[in-house]
Image: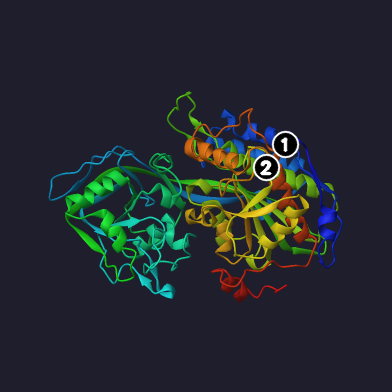
Amino acid sequence: MLTRTLVLAAALCAVPFTSVLAQPAMTVDPDRLTETVRTLASDVFEGRAPGTRGEERTLGYLIARFEALGLEPAGTDGGWLQKVPLLHTRLGTPERLGFASPKGAIDPVLAQDIYLSTIRPDDAARIADAPVVFVGYGVKAPERGWDDFKGADLKGKVAVFLINDPDFAAKPGEPAAGKFGDRTMTYYGRWTYKFEEAARQGAVAALIVHNAAGVGYGWNVVISPGGENYDIVRPAEQLTSLKLQGWLSAEMSARLFAAAGLDLAKLEVAARAPGFRPVELKGVTLGADIPVTPEVVDSHNVLARIPGTTRPDEIVMYGAHWDAYGAGKPDAEGRIYRAGANDDALGIAGMFEIARAMKAGPAAQRSVVFGAWTAEERGLLGSEYYAANPLFPMDKTVANLGLDILQTAGAANDVVLVGRGQNTLEDDMARVAATQGRTVTPESLPERGLFYRADHFSFAKRGVPVMLLMGIAGAANLKQGGVAAGQAWIDAYTGKCYHQACDAWGPDWNLDGAVQDIELIGVIGAELANSSRWPQWKAGSEFKAIRDKAGVPKQ
């Protein structure tokens, strides 16, 4: 593997920024990346789960690394940390779990037929024979002329959803076609939205029919949290109505609908029309009595800063998440820690390298803040808590630049763009990539909604322009093997090791492509830190109005 150098000064001089300061060369060393990844993914950190001994060790390591790089603490009250109070729940062995139906009892097997969790602080999840209602895609979007609920009363009932948007599987000429960005997923297609909407409708439980193509991953990923869940600690009046939330396997879903005399495949087609109305599975009810162990866990974000010189109140922010999945059942090789070597120890390593390069030269005009987020794997909770309780104002945050999973298969001829058409940072990506001899390739499967699945989204919701580099967003055109080799890497990683114990460093890792991406996003951040420019949301982005309302300069 090669250590390559991309000179910031050359990139800076290529564009007409105001008050630009020359920067030193940015050198990202794959050996330092490897050292960081092997350390964070080692058994010493016990899978880096929030609220565990693994977190304590991780926080100490991150702080020590930022201190060694010469950065300043940027957390609460002048420290390195921002406390993130989390509700952690774990389901026990069900005392009762089953469906009643006109064709007899249906008893699903946990983790095989059904996956469940809760984000309520109760000692048990009890549901007394609640009626089951199919609500299609569960979308309530008045701005798009779409309402799957049609005023139906879901209080005390179990809502069953399809994943993704109404136009995900729509064929040309169908009413839903093009209503929700065609193959590009909107937030309405995300499982998080569907659970939120079910709670707004008063449902007592919500279940999503698993479809690997629609959600972007297999059943193995669905069940990987092992019955655990997390949420930000909320006051009683803000608690969700959902006592249970989760997924049904495709096979169990078809069986359940058939027991009510319904054809799920036909209902999936019907749900792609705006006139669809909720359909009760007559005679089908869910009963559950599952013990829950709730606890409040104080987790933490780690924040570090390089202060700006002339406009220190304006913030360019980098982000990556430090958490992974902790301990689980032994895999075939006996490994119990799901330590996330790529997801996202490699992103943390990339942030350290960017911080090292920036600290080596003169301080920029704007401050540069590095956020190591907790609980990303639990629903973007660390970044969401920060965005709801920012330590630097959102209207002074120039951009948020995220690193979350980078490809480890070698140098590429391109860089993959997540969220095409959202903001002007993608124009910066194209320009800087060109200086590397690379082009920009849009994500290959926008229907998977990766734009909504990483920590940068917490900032986008507040109107901050964002950029995400994620190696599984599309097959890189690798210098050795082309697109086919890039897709083979994605298939192997997502099919076998994503959120599993085998997401571990290996001697076969080739970090030349990761180096390219880290240098690219490092240059973009350095340019912003040394200019007076404010990235802008593009017309048509759902986040543009939020930023415009904040009164951020339009330049």
**In the rendered view of the protein, which quadrant contains the C terminus?**
bottom right
Residue 94, image quadrant: top left
Residue at numbered disc 2: 514
Sort mark 2 into few (<14), some (14-19) or many (20+) by Cα contacts within 10 Å.
many
Earlier in the chain: of badge 2 and badge 1, it is: 1
User: Residues at badges 2 and 1 in contact (C-beta under 8 Å)?
Assistant: yes
At 62% from the left and 41% from the top, the residue drawn is 407
Place of residue 320 in the rendered image (x, y in percent of width and height, measured from the top left): 62, 48
Q: Taking 417 as reference, is 447 left or right?
A: left
Place of residue 416 in the rendered image (x, y in percent of width and height, measured from the top left): 62, 51
Query: In the rendered image, is residue 85 in sight?
Result: yes
At 42% from the left and 49% from the top, the residue drawn is 213
The label shown at residue 238 is none
Nearest to the observer: residue 480 or residue 238? 480
Mark 2 and mark 1: span between their CA atoms?
A: 8 Å
Q: Amino acid at mark 1?
A: Pro
Query: In the rendered image, is residue 363 in sight?
Result: no
Q: Taking 360 as reference, is 499 left or right?
A: left
Q: Residue placed farthest to the top in the image?
A: 333
Q: Taking 380 as reference, is 417 left or right?
A: right
At 26% from the left and 68% from the top, the residue drawn is 152
Its colouring scheme is rainbow
Element class at badge 2: helix
Nearest to the observer: residue 501 or residue 266? 266
**Above-or-below relation of 406 to 232:** above
Nearest to the observer: residue 443 or residue 335? 443
Residue at numbered disc 1: 30
Place of residue 133 in the rendered image (x, y in percent of width and height, measured from the top left): 25, 59
Element class at badge 1: helix
At 73% from the left and 56% from the top, the residue drawn is 524
Q: Amino acid at mark 2?
A: Ala
Q: Taking 3 as reference, is 490 left or right?
A: left
